[in-house]
Amino acid sequence: MKSMTPFRFSLSSNDIQTIGGDDSFWLGGQLVHLQSGVTYIDIDREIADNYMFNKTINMDETSIFSILELKKEIWFGGENTLLVYNEKQDFWRSYNLRLGGGVSRATSMIDAGDDVWVGSSRGITILNKSNKKPILSKVEEYFNNIYIYDMAVGIWIGTETGLFLYDQTKRMIQEYTTYGYKKKDVTFPLKYIDYTAFTQDSRQILAANRSGVLKFNFMDRQWSNAVDPAIFGGLEIKAMALHKNIVFIANENGIVQYDMKKNLMDVFNYSFIGQVNDMYIKGRKIWLGTTEGLISYRYK
Protein backbone atom coordinates (compact mmCIF):
# COMPACT_ATOMS: atom_id res chain seq x y z
CA MET A 1 0.00 0.00 0.00
CA LYS A 2 1.32 3.42 -0.96
CA SER A 3 1.41 5.91 1.89
CA MET A 4 -1.56 8.27 1.53
CA THR A 5 -1.03 11.50 3.45
CA PRO A 6 -3.92 13.83 4.36
CA PHE A 7 -3.00 17.52 4.30
CA ARG A 8 -2.55 18.51 7.93
CA PHE A 9 -3.59 22.18 7.79
CA SER A 10 -7.20 23.31 8.12
CA LEU A 11 -8.96 23.91 4.80
CA SER A 12 -11.88 26.17 3.91
CA SER A 13 -13.75 23.11 2.58
CA ASN A 14 -13.21 19.41 3.18
CA ASP A 15 -15.27 18.51 0.11
CA ILE A 16 -12.81 19.58 -2.58
CA GLN A 17 -14.19 19.84 -6.11
CA THR A 18 -11.30 21.47 -7.97
CA ILE A 19 -7.58 22.21 -7.80
CA GLY A 20 -6.07 25.07 -9.80
CA GLY A 21 -2.68 26.73 -10.24
CA ASP A 22 0.88 25.91 -11.25
CA ASP A 23 3.76 26.11 -8.75
CA SER A 24 1.36 26.44 -5.83
CA PHE A 25 -2.35 25.81 -5.99
CA TRP A 26 -5.84 26.87 -5.01
CA LEU A 27 -8.63 24.66 -3.70
CA GLY A 28 -12.37 25.11 -4.12
CA GLY A 29 -15.20 22.93 -2.90
CA GLN A 30 -18.81 22.50 -1.90
CA LEU A 31 -20.45 25.19 0.19
CA VAL A 32 -21.32 23.15 3.26
CA HIS A 33 -21.23 25.55 6.21
CA LEU A 34 -20.78 29.20 7.16
CA GLN A 35 -17.00 28.79 7.42
CA SER A 36 -16.58 27.82 3.76
CA GLY A 37 -14.33 29.63 1.28
CA VAL A 38 -11.28 28.95 -0.90
CA THR A 39 -7.77 27.93 0.13
CA TYR A 40 -4.34 28.84 -1.23
CA ILE A 41 -1.56 26.34 -0.56
CA ASP A 42 2.20 26.74 -0.96
CA ILE A 43 3.43 23.19 -0.47
CA ASP A 44 7.15 24.03 -0.56
CA ARG A 45 6.84 26.53 2.31
CA GLU A 46 4.02 24.64 4.02
CA ILE A 47 1.73 27.67 4.01
CA ALA A 48 -2.05 27.57 3.74
CA ASP A 49 -4.24 30.70 3.54
CA ASN A 50 -8.02 30.49 3.79
CA TYR A 51 -10.27 33.15 2.26
CA MET A 52 -13.59 32.75 4.03
CA PHE A 53 -16.84 33.96 2.48
CA ASN A 54 -18.17 35.42 5.71
CA LYS A 55 -14.97 37.38 6.41
CA THR A 56 -13.93 38.62 2.95
CA ILE A 57 -15.35 41.73 1.29
CA ASN A 58 -16.88 41.32 -2.22
CA MET A 59 -16.70 37.53 -2.03
CA ASP A 60 -20.15 36.00 -2.51
CA GLU A 61 -20.88 32.59 -1.02
CA THR A 62 -20.88 29.79 -3.58
CA SER A 63 -19.63 26.28 -4.15
CA ILE A 64 -16.54 26.27 -6.40
CA PHE A 65 -16.29 23.82 -9.32
CA SER A 66 -13.47 25.25 -11.45
CA ILE A 67 -10.39 27.45 -11.03
CA LEU A 68 -8.34 29.29 -13.66
CA GLU A 69 -5.05 31.03 -12.88
CA LEU A 70 -4.33 33.96 -15.21
CA LYS A 71 -1.37 36.35 -15.26
CA LYS A 72 -2.84 38.84 -12.79
CA GLU A 73 -6.03 37.19 -11.59
CA ILE A 74 -7.46 33.94 -10.28
CA TRP A 75 -10.95 33.05 -11.50
CA PHE A 76 -13.25 30.79 -9.48
CA GLY A 77 -16.33 29.31 -11.17
CA GLY A 78 -19.31 28.67 -8.91
CA GLU A 79 -23.10 28.39 -9.03
CA ASN A 80 -24.38 31.30 -11.14
CA THR A 81 -21.32 33.14 -9.85
CA LEU A 82 -17.79 34.04 -10.93
CA LEU A 83 -15.32 35.10 -8.23
CA VAL A 84 -12.19 36.98 -9.34
CA TYR A 85 -9.17 37.59 -7.12
CA ASN A 86 -6.58 40.22 -8.06
CA GLU A 87 -3.37 38.97 -6.46
CA LYS A 88 -1.41 42.22 -6.72
CA GLN A 89 -4.15 44.38 -5.22
CA ASP A 90 -5.38 41.65 -2.84
CA PHE A 91 -8.93 42.39 -3.95
CA TRP A 92 -11.96 40.17 -4.59
CA ARG A 93 -14.94 40.79 -6.84
CA SER A 94 -18.07 38.75 -7.58
CA TYR A 95 -19.87 38.61 -10.92
CA ASN A 96 -23.26 37.23 -11.86
CA LEU A 97 -22.86 34.26 -14.20
CA ARG A 98 -26.10 32.80 -15.55
CA LEU A 99 -26.53 30.46 -18.50
CA GLY A 100 -30.13 29.70 -19.39
CA GLY A 101 -32.68 29.29 -16.64
CA GLY A 102 -32.18 27.82 -13.20
CA VAL A 103 -28.87 27.01 -11.55
CA SER A 104 -25.75 26.69 -13.70
CA ARG A 105 -22.43 25.35 -12.42
CA ALA A 106 -19.18 26.59 -13.96
CA THR A 107 -17.61 23.17 -14.49
CA SER A 108 -14.48 24.29 -16.38
CA MET A 109 -12.62 27.37 -17.63
CA ILE A 110 -9.83 27.86 -20.16
CA ASP A 111 -7.68 30.82 -21.19
CA ALA A 112 -8.26 31.66 -24.87
CA GLY A 113 -6.18 34.78 -25.53
CA ASP A 114 -8.25 37.89 -24.88
CA ASP A 115 -11.15 35.81 -23.63
CA VAL A 116 -11.99 33.10 -21.13
CA TRP A 117 -14.27 30.22 -22.10
CA VAL A 118 -16.53 29.06 -19.28
CA GLY A 119 -18.17 25.64 -19.57
CA SER A 120 -21.15 24.92 -17.37
CA SER A 121 -24.01 22.56 -16.73
CA ARG A 122 -26.06 24.65 -19.19
CA GLY A 123 -23.60 25.34 -21.99
CA ILE A 124 -20.68 27.65 -22.78
CA THR A 125 -20.22 31.38 -22.37
CA ILE A 126 -17.23 33.40 -23.55
CA LEU A 127 -16.16 36.26 -21.28
CA ASN A 128 -13.92 39.22 -22.02
CA LYS A 129 -10.92 39.05 -19.67
CA SER A 130 -10.92 42.77 -18.94
CA ASN A 131 -14.55 43.61 -18.24
CA LYS A 132 -15.88 40.06 -17.61
CA LYS A 133 -18.80 40.71 -19.97
CA PRO A 134 -20.15 37.90 -22.17
CA ILE A 135 -19.31 37.86 -25.87
CA LEU A 136 -22.18 36.68 -28.04
CA SER A 137 -21.16 33.94 -30.46
CA LYS A 138 -22.43 30.91 -32.35
CA VAL A 139 -20.58 28.76 -29.83
CA GLU A 140 -23.04 29.74 -27.12
CA GLU A 141 -25.96 28.90 -29.41
CA TYR A 142 -24.45 25.57 -30.49
CA PHE A 143 -23.96 24.31 -26.92
CA ASN A 144 -27.07 25.88 -25.42
CA ASN A 145 -28.39 23.78 -22.49
CA ILE A 146 -25.78 21.06 -23.11
CA TYR A 147 -23.79 19.84 -20.10
CA ILE A 148 -20.11 20.73 -20.47
CA TYR A 149 -18.05 18.32 -18.39
CA ASP A 150 -14.58 19.59 -19.17
CA MET A 151 -12.54 21.76 -21.52
CA ALA A 152 -8.86 21.83 -22.41
CA VAL A 153 -6.45 24.23 -24.06
CA GLY A 154 -6.84 23.89 -27.76
CA ILE A 155 -9.94 24.39 -27.57
CA TRP A 156 -11.22 20.89 -26.69
CA ILE A 157 -14.75 20.49 -25.36
CA GLY A 158 -16.11 17.40 -23.59
CA THR A 159 -19.89 17.34 -23.37
CA GLU A 160 -22.86 15.06 -22.73
CA THR A 161 -23.40 14.90 -26.51
CA GLY A 162 -19.82 14.19 -27.59
CA LEU A 163 -16.27 15.44 -28.06
CA PHE A 164 -15.67 18.64 -30.02
CA LEU A 165 -12.90 21.02 -31.02
CA TYR A 166 -13.04 24.70 -31.84
CA ASP A 167 -10.77 26.13 -34.54
CA GLN A 168 -10.01 29.71 -33.42
CA THR A 169 -8.59 30.66 -36.83
CA LYS A 170 -11.55 29.42 -38.86
CA ARG A 171 -14.01 30.04 -36.00
CA MET A 172 -15.48 26.63 -36.57
CA ILE A 173 -16.76 23.85 -34.31
CA GLN A 174 -15.93 20.32 -35.42
CA GLU A 175 -16.40 16.81 -34.10
CA TYR A 176 -13.22 14.99 -33.13
CA THR A 177 -13.70 12.30 -35.80
CA THR A 178 -13.07 14.91 -38.51
CA TYR A 179 -9.82 16.12 -36.92
CA GLY A 180 -6.35 14.67 -37.49
CA TYR A 181 -5.60 11.14 -38.71
CA LYS A 182 -6.58 7.64 -37.62
CA LYS A 183 -4.72 4.41 -38.38
CA LYS A 184 -6.66 1.28 -39.31
CA ASP A 185 -6.05 -0.40 -35.95
CA VAL A 186 -7.49 2.55 -34.01
CA THR A 187 -11.16 2.35 -33.07
CA PHE A 188 -13.28 5.29 -32.03
CA PRO A 189 -15.80 4.47 -29.25
CA LEU A 190 -19.18 3.13 -30.34
CA LYS A 191 -20.71 5.30 -27.63
CA TYR A 192 -19.43 8.77 -28.45
CA ILE A 193 -21.31 10.66 -25.73
CA ASP A 194 -20.38 11.88 -22.22
CA TYR A 195 -16.73 12.84 -22.57
CA THR A 196 -16.16 13.74 -18.95
CA ALA A 197 -12.43 14.44 -18.53
CA PHE A 198 -9.27 15.65 -20.27
CA THR A 199 -5.61 15.64 -19.34
CA GLN A 200 -2.74 16.91 -21.46
CA ASP A 201 0.92 17.83 -21.71
CA SER A 202 3.01 19.40 -24.48
CA ARG A 203 2.95 16.20 -26.56
CA GLN A 204 -0.55 14.83 -26.24
CA ILE A 205 -4.08 15.14 -24.95
CA LEU A 206 -6.22 12.34 -23.50
CA ALA A 207 -10.04 12.41 -23.66
CA ALA A 208 -12.19 9.98 -21.68
CA ASN A 209 -15.65 8.50 -21.68
CA ARG A 210 -16.99 5.15 -20.44
CA SER A 211 -15.92 3.42 -23.68
CA GLY A 212 -12.23 4.19 -23.20
CA VAL A 213 -9.57 6.89 -23.27
CA LEU A 214 -8.46 8.32 -26.60
CA LYS A 215 -5.09 9.97 -27.18
CA PHE A 216 -4.28 12.63 -29.76
CA ASN A 217 -0.60 13.26 -30.53
CA PHE A 218 0.07 16.92 -31.26
CA MET A 219 3.23 16.18 -33.27
CA ASP A 220 1.92 13.76 -35.91
CA ARG A 221 -1.79 14.60 -35.40
CA GLN A 222 -2.57 10.90 -34.93
CA TRP A 223 -5.33 9.39 -32.82
CA SER A 224 -4.71 6.24 -30.79
CA ASN A 225 -6.46 4.13 -28.15
CA ALA A 226 -4.72 4.95 -24.87
CA VAL A 227 -6.69 3.08 -22.18
CA ASP A 228 -9.10 0.19 -22.63
CA PRO A 229 -12.32 0.53 -20.57
CA ALA A 230 -11.51 -2.77 -18.82
CA ILE A 231 -8.70 -0.93 -17.01
CA PHE A 232 -11.14 1.37 -15.19
CA GLY A 233 -14.23 -0.86 -15.26
CA GLY A 234 -16.08 1.18 -17.86
CA LEU A 235 -17.19 3.60 -15.15
CA GLU A 236 -17.58 7.35 -15.54
CA ILE A 237 -14.21 9.04 -15.18
CA LYS A 238 -14.30 12.00 -12.80
CA ALA A 239 -10.77 13.29 -13.41
CA MET A 240 -7.43 12.40 -14.99
CA ALA A 241 -3.81 13.47 -14.53
CA LEU A 242 -0.81 12.72 -16.73
CA HIS A 243 2.94 12.32 -16.30
CA LYS A 244 4.71 11.12 -19.45
CA ASN A 245 3.32 7.61 -20.06
CA ILE A 246 1.57 7.32 -16.69
CA VAL A 247 -2.07 8.33 -16.48
CA PHE A 248 -4.09 8.56 -13.27
CA ILE A 249 -7.80 7.88 -13.62
CA ALA A 250 -10.36 8.67 -10.91
CA ASN A 251 -13.81 7.10 -10.87
CA GLU A 252 -16.37 6.14 -8.23
CA ASN A 253 -14.32 3.08 -7.24
CA GLY A 254 -11.08 4.94 -6.54
CA ILE A 255 -7.94 5.65 -8.57
CA VAL A 256 -6.19 3.69 -11.29
CA GLN A 257 -2.52 4.39 -11.96
CA TYR A 258 -1.80 3.06 -15.45
CA ASP A 259 1.44 2.91 -17.42
CA MET A 260 0.31 3.17 -21.04
CA LYS A 261 3.69 2.03 -22.40
CA LYS A 262 4.30 -0.96 -20.12
CA ASN A 263 0.61 -1.86 -19.73
CA LEU A 264 0.93 -2.01 -15.94
CA MET A 265 -1.60 -0.78 -13.41
CA ASP A 266 -2.19 -0.16 -9.71
CA VAL A 267 -5.60 0.37 -8.14
CA PHE A 268 -6.23 2.42 -4.99
CA ASN A 269 -9.75 2.06 -3.65
CA TYR A 270 -9.33 2.79 0.06
CA SER A 271 -12.56 4.01 1.66
CA PHE A 272 -10.89 6.88 3.54
CA ILE A 273 -10.04 8.58 0.23
CA GLY A 274 -13.68 9.23 -0.62
CA GLN A 275 -14.61 10.37 -4.13
CA VAL A 276 -11.70 11.93 -6.03
CA ASN A 277 -12.91 15.01 -7.92
CA ASP A 278 -9.63 16.49 -9.17
CA MET A 279 -5.91 15.67 -9.29
CA TYR A 280 -2.72 17.71 -9.46
CA ILE A 281 0.82 16.44 -10.09
CA LYS A 282 3.86 18.23 -8.69
CA GLY A 283 7.26 16.57 -8.72
CA ARG A 284 7.01 13.01 -7.44
CA LYS A 285 3.70 13.57 -5.69
CA ILE A 286 0.12 13.55 -6.85
CA TRP A 287 -2.42 15.56 -4.89
CA LEU A 288 -6.03 14.41 -4.71
CA GLY A 289 -8.96 16.74 -4.18
CA THR A 290 -11.60 14.52 -2.60
CA THR A 291 -14.85 14.53 -0.66
CA GLU A 292 -12.70 13.79 2.40
CA GLY A 293 -10.25 16.66 1.90
CA LEU A 294 -6.80 16.95 0.33
CA ILE A 295 -4.65 13.81 0.13
CA SER A 296 -1.25 13.18 -1.44
CA TYR A 297 1.03 10.27 -2.17
CA ARG A 298 4.41 9.76 -3.80
CA TYR A 299 3.91 7.81 -7.01
CA LYS A 300 7.54 7.52 -8.13
Image (cartoon, rainbow, N blue to C red):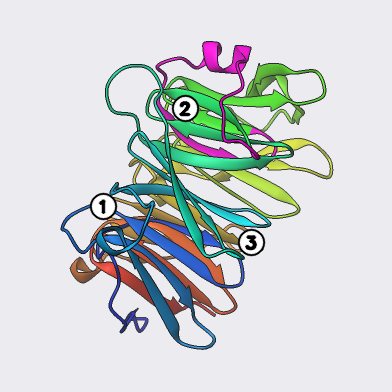
105 on left or right of 163: left
**What whole-number distance in Å separates the C-alpha atoms at marks 2 and 1?**
22 Å
Q: Nearer the viewer, residue 90 or 127?
A: 90
Specify the quadrant that holds the C terminus.
bottom right
Instruction: Indicate the amino acid at tag 1.
Output: Gln
Task: Judge whether residue 12 is colored magenta.
Answer: no
Q: Residues within 10 Å of mark 3 (few under 14, many from 20)?
A: few
Q: Residue at image x 65%, y 57%?
A: 72
Q: Is residue 154 above or below residue 42?
A: above
Q: Which residue is mark 2?
A: 159
Q: Which residue is mark 1?
A: 30
Q: Determine the secondary structure under disc 1.
A: loop
Q: Position of residue 188 (x, y in %)?
A: 58, 27
Q: Residue at image x 65%, y 45%?
A: 205
* Callouts 3 and 1 close, C-beta under 8 Å: no
Q: Determine the secondary structure under disc 2.
A: strand
Q: What's drawn in magenta, residue-wise? A: 129-155
